[in-house]
Amino acid sequence: MPLPRSVLAVTLYPFVFIRKGCSTPDLRKHELVHCWQVQRDGWLRFYLTYIWHGLTRRYRDIPAEVEAHAHETELPPHLAALVDLGVKNISDVDSVNS
């Protein structure tokens, strides 16, 4: 999927697209948080809210981005456990408990 130059990654649940050569552990954690947000909030609610906030706020002020950026260096325990277990696709997990 071609991404705009300023975009390093996009999560279109359950898929994550990362620009070639830009994948880092922190970026993968950030996108994993977005996958979890979609599971938590539901696909429609997450994306409608994200688009609305994207139109009315700066990127860094979008609540989903604030939450994802907060967890780039250290994932919450329920997500860190998935990484430790080697889960590659969060949709493979029946439920994620916070």
Image (tube, rainbow, N blue to C red):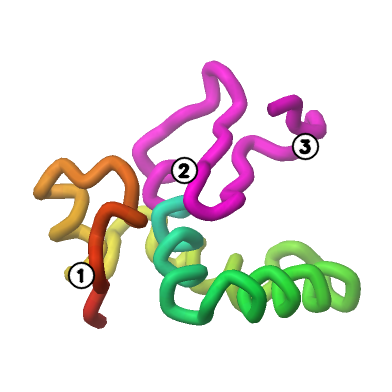
Say which residue label 1 marks. Answer: 78
Upstream in the sequence, badge 3 or badge 1?
Answer: 3
The amino acid pointed to by label 2 is Leu
Q: Closer to the N terminus: mark 2 or mark 3?
A: 3
- Residue at disc 1, secondary structure: helix
Residue of label 2: 27
Q: Which residue is drawn at 56% across and 32% down?
A: 18
**Marks 1 and 2, Cα distance to the nearest angstrom?**
18 Å
- Quadrant where the C terminus sits is bottom left
**Crowd rating for badge 3 (residues with CA inside 10 Å; few <14, some 14–19, many 20+):** few
Taking the spot 49% from the left edge, 64% from the top edge, the residue there is 68
Query: Label 3: which residue?
Result: 6
Q: Is mark 3 on a helix, strand or loop?
A: loop
Residue displayed at 53% across by 77% down: 42
Left or right: residue 30 compared with residue 80: right
Question: Residue 39 or 21: which is nearer the viewer?
Answer: 39
| x and y percentages locating residue 77 in the rendered image | 18, 69
Amino acid carrying label 3: it is: Ser
Identify the disc placed on residue 35.
none
Please tell me in which quadrant of the rendered image residue 71 appears: bottom left
Q: Does the magenta stretch include residue 62?
A: no
Please indicate whether residue 90 sits to the left or right of residue 6 in the image: left
Residue extending farthest to the left is 85
Q: Distance between the residues labelled 3 and 1?
A: 30 Å
Q: Which residue lies furthest to the right in this view?
A: 55
Task: Magenta stretch: give its range.
Answer: 1-29
Please tell me which residue is depicted at 24% across the width and 67% down the height of the picture. Answer: 94
